[in-house]
Amino acid sequence: MTRGIRFAVAAGVCVVLAGALTACGAEAGPARKDAGTELARLRSLLPNAQQLPDGFSARPGEGWKPPFRPAGRDCRLVLGMAGGGAPRRTPGVRVAATYPGDELGELLGVGLASYTGVDAEHRFDELTEALEGCPVARSPLPGRSTSLRLSSLKLDAIGDDVQAKRLRGRLNGYPYEMHMVFARIGGTLVSLVHTGVANVDVRRTQQLAQFLVEQAAR
């Protein structure tokens, strides 16, 4: 395990034997890849110091975690996926890392997941439906002034299957903004979350989203 980056091989209800990912109930075929090979490939896609936008630390931390658990299944699924998690127990290989930025409260979370082609399509469709069902992410806890409204995030074209959203509002009473970008490239799902207090630079979000999609499409 590389220091500071948490890598997870999630087998769900299935089994990883001798380095081969066995997907229970999934279609067999060329889309299924060796788990060890896929883990190495996903690790190679994570940005290094030269590939990060200016102002981000080259020393990544563990995968991004949502700052609160929102009310509603759809909102919980969306924020969980933003950190590179799976929408439900399903076989796949995942890596995730977080890069601190130099602005107040700024974090950049990157998640990469590899599935069979069919599973990747299902996961992306499920995420798209969840985004439609989460117009506002709110904390269910009393006394917490946490409410973030979702709106479209306008980015230059970065791929075909892409969802980009801006969440803006209050987190524990403080101004807060979050950009979320999700993309599917074949059997690879890319998730990017860029957070900060008050305004978050869309150009930096665009730069990293473009880089990750291009890397995954190699």
Image (tube, rainbow, N blue to C red):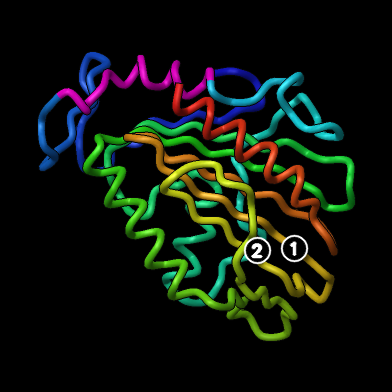
- Horizontal and vertical percent for residue 150? 60, 71
Is residue 58 left or right of 104 when viewed as pictured? left
Marks 1, 2: nearer the viewer: 2
In the image, residue 60 above or below residue 152 = above
Question: Left or right: 208 with respect to 102?
Answer: left
Q: Secondary structure at mark 1?
A: strand
Q: Return the x and y of residue 203 as percentages of the image width and height.
A: 76, 46
Q: Quadrant of residue 14 in the image?
A: top left
Q: Compared to 121, does 165 lie above or below?
A: below
Which residue shows up at 35% across the image and 15% down it?
37
Query: Looking at the picture, which amino acid does disc 2 mark?
Result: Arg
> What residue would you read off at disc 1?
177
Residue at 65% from the left image edge and 20% from the top image edge = 3
Q: Say which amino acid is labelled 1.
A: Glu
How far from the left and from the top, in percent, is residue 198?
Answer: 85, 64
Q: Quadrant of the N terminus?
A: top right
Q: Mark 1–mark 2 contact, CB under 8 Å?
A: yes
- Residue density around tag 2, few if under 14, some if 14–19, many if 20 or more, within 10 Å: many
Q: Quadrant of residue 69?
A: bottom right
Check if residue 101 falls in the magenta segment.
no
Whole-number angstrom distance, CA of label 1 to CA of label 2: 7 Å
Which quadrant holds the C terminus?
top left
Decide: few, some or many residues near mark 1? Use Cα within 10 Å; few <14, some 14-19, many ≥20: many
The disc, 1 or 2, on the residue closer to the chain's N-terminal end is 2
- Secondary structure, mark 2, is strand
Say which residue label 2 marks.
166
| Residue depicted at 31% across the width and 43% down the height | 120
Q: Which residues are magenta?
A: 30-44
Q: Is residue 42 magenta?
A: yes
